[in-house]
Amino acid sequence: MRCPRSGGNFSQMIRTCWDLGRRVTDFADLKLTKWAHMLGFRGHFSTKSRRYSTTLGVLRGVRRTWQSEQGRIRAGHPPIDPDTTLVVSDWRYLATGYTPGEELLAQTVRDNRTATQRLKREGDLE
């Protein structure tokens, strides 16, 4: 068997899968000949087992942490001390009360409630 454009080690691994799949009955359930092109691994190339290796979720977390640290360095921010809680707050006075739209909605609710209570008192609404 010859593998075009692949190194000798890759070809040897495929050949080993074929040999084990055809000659060793203990490995029959692994279907090594069917998956020889994937070096005997029966799954998606990026699938990882928690027992075998790290998971893709862990790799994403490490990548996210590294990217945020690089962004902090580019922005000129100091490194985060893990023993310190960073609190960022900015309190400003914006307004008091309802906006005009909220005032209209609140007044409509009040009017409807008042009308409902009046109708209940008069016996027109149960």
Image: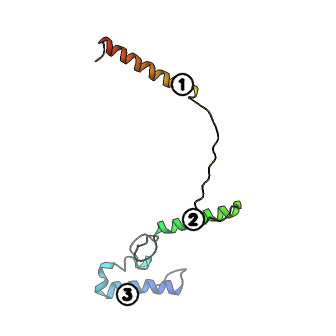
What residue is disc 2 on? 65
**Which residue appears at 41% of the width and 73% of the height?**
50
What residue is disc 1 on? 103
Q: Residues within 10 Å of mark 1 (few under 14, many from 20)?
A: few
What residue is disc 3 on? 19
Query: Mark 3 or 1 closer to N-term?
Result: 3
Give the Cα distance between marks 3 and 2: 44 Å
- Please state which of residues 49 and 125 is positioned toward the viewer in this rendering: 125
Quadrant holding the C terminus: top left
**Which residue appears at 37% of the width and 76% of the height?**
34
Query: Mark 3 or 2 closer to N-term?
Result: 3
Q: Nearer the viewer, mark 3 or mark 2?
A: 2
Residue 65 in the image, given as x and y percentages of width and height: 57, 65
Could you tell me the amino acid type at mark 2? Thr
Residue 11 in the image, given as x and y percentages of width and height: 48, 84
Residue 75 in the image, given as x and y percentages of width and height: 70, 60
Could you tell me the amino acid type at mark 3? Asp
Q: Is residue 22 above or below residue 78?
A: below
**Which residue appears at 34% of the width and 14% of the height?**
119
Give the Cα distance between marks 2 and 1: 45 Å
- Please state which of residues 39 and 65 is positioned toward the viewer in this rendering: 65
